[in-house]
Amino acid sequence: MKNKTIIAAVSVLLTGCTNLKYPNWEYVRIEHQVPDKSCVYKIQDACSLPTNECMNWHKQRATKFNANTVVITSSEKLERYSSSAWTGGVSGGENSSTLAEYYYCNGAKNINP
């Protein structure tokens, strides 16, 4: 029972730290094209984590540049495997790369905390 309490406390602390380091990151939108011409371009960035992890990574990173919209410009999945004659096994796995642009957009669709 004590271990479950410790695990729960650590989980809450880690979640809280993410919110302190990247304030309001959960309000950043993910788009596949620029939603409005009035959006202001901030920067382009790439992520090499699995795709589902990249979405949160981009949202968190966008807050560092005062952006509230992430536009995914490309996403690529790479599969690399190799075999070894010595061990008789196969190693490798899937990697992905996601390229995104960060924008600051005004408008009714943008959620303000």
Image (cartoon, rainbow, N blue to C red):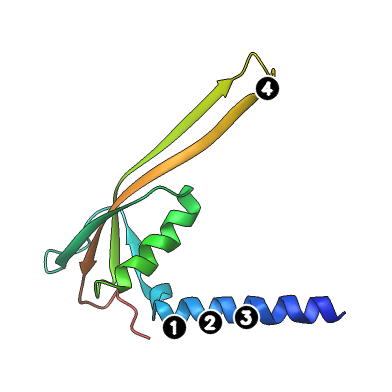
Q: Is residue 110 left or right of residue 10?
A: left
Q: Residues within 10 Å of mark 2 (few under 14, many from 20)?
A: few
Question: In which image quadrant can residue 33 be found?
Answer: bottom left
Q: Mark 4 vs mark 3: which is more N-terminal?
A: 3
What is the secondary structure assignment of the residue under circle 3?
Answer: helix
Q: Which residue is mark 1?
A: 20
| Amino acid type shown at disc 4 | Gly
| Nearer the camera: disc 1 or disc 4 | 4
Q: Which residue is mark 4?
A: 89
Q: Where residue 63 sits: x, y (%)?
A: 31, 73
What is the secondary structure assignment of the residue under circle 4?
Answer: loop
Q: Where residue 83 sits: x, y (%)?
A: 59, 19
Q: Nearer the viewer, residue 96 or 27?
A: 96
> Which residue of the protein is positioned furthest toward the top in this rendering?
85
| Amino acid type shown at disc 3 | Val
Circle 1/circle 4 CB separation < 8 Å:
no
Q: Which residue is mark 2?
A: 16
Instruction: Report the number of discs.
Output: 4
Q: CA distance from mark 1 to mark 3?
A: 12 Å
> Which residue of the protein is positioned furthest toward the front in this rendering?
86
**Residue 12 image label:** 3
**Residue 46 image label:** none
Q: Mark 2 vs mark 4: which is more N-terminal?
A: 2
In this rendering, the answer to whether 88 lies above or below 40 is above
Circle 3/circle 2 CB separation < 8 Å:
yes
> Which residue of the protein is positioned furthest toward the bottom in this rendering?
113
Residue at image x 38%, y 86%? 113
